[in-house]
Image (cartoon, rainbow, N blue to C red):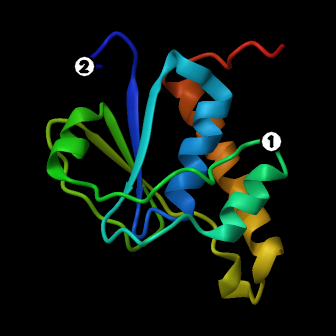
Amino acid sequence: MTGSKPSVLFVCVKNGGKSQMAAGLMRELVGDAMTVDSAGTRPGESVNGLSAEVLAEVGIDITRQVPKEATPDLVRAADLVVTLGREARVDPIDNRVESWDTDEPSERGIEGLERMRLIRDDISARVGDLARQLGVPPRARD
């Protein structure tokens, strides 16, 4: 790892849904034990409302996040880059890139909040596994 604590960059296409959810879930899980960021290969204008809503259901607020581009500098700064979904692609720059082919319930006709909850739960399990792989313990709860 490049710094005193591991850093991860979550990337999807628009940086409005899956990557924002992954970053929010990871921040909630590990607190400041890890540097967490998210970006998009073609960033949109805002966070997906349904993504924010299903994270709010588990006590996580991503409504103040703003989509940003996965620039070479941002990619280079991360120890690990995780792409979410089949369309997001980044070129590795002296770091590890891992691709998560996340659940896509719309392929099974599931839409709306139900779709986003399934995506949230899939990403949440993957985030927990990643934190354990990186040796970052969950933060203490009050």
Residue type marked 2: Thr
Q: Earlier in the sequence, mark 2 or mark 1?
A: 2
Give whichever of 95, 56 is nearer the camera.
56
Q: Picture quarter containing residue 142?
A: top right
Asked if 78 appears above or below 90 in the picture, the reply is above
Who's the residue at 24% across and 45% down the image?
75
Instruction: Please tell me whether mark 2 sits on a helix, a strand or a loop.
Output: loop
Give left or right: position of 57 versus 109. Answer: right
Asked if 129 appears above or below 62 in the picture, the reply is above
Who's the residue at 61% across and 23% down the image?
30
Asked if 108 appears above or below 30 in the picture, the reply is below
Who's the residue at 75% across and 90% down the image?
109
Residue 55 image point, x, y percent: 74, 52
Name the residue tied to disc 2.
2
Residue 123 image point, x, y percent: 64, 52
Residue type marked 1: Gly
Instruction: Please tell me whether mark 1 sits on a helix, a strand or a loop.
Output: loop
Name the residue tied to disc 1.
59
Residue 74 image point, x, y percent: 24, 43
Asked if 34 appears above or below 130 in the picture, the reply is above
Report the quarter where the N terminus lies.
Answer: top left
- How many dots with numbers? 2
Give left or right: position of 76 versus 67. Answer: left
Give left or right: position of 138 versus 36. Answer: right
Question: Which residue ends up furthest to the bottom in the rendered image?
Answer: 109
Q: Picture quarter containing residue 113?
A: bottom right
Who's the residue at 68% across and 20% down the image?
138
Is disc 2 surrounded by few (<14), some (14 to 19) or many (20+) residues within 10 Å?
few
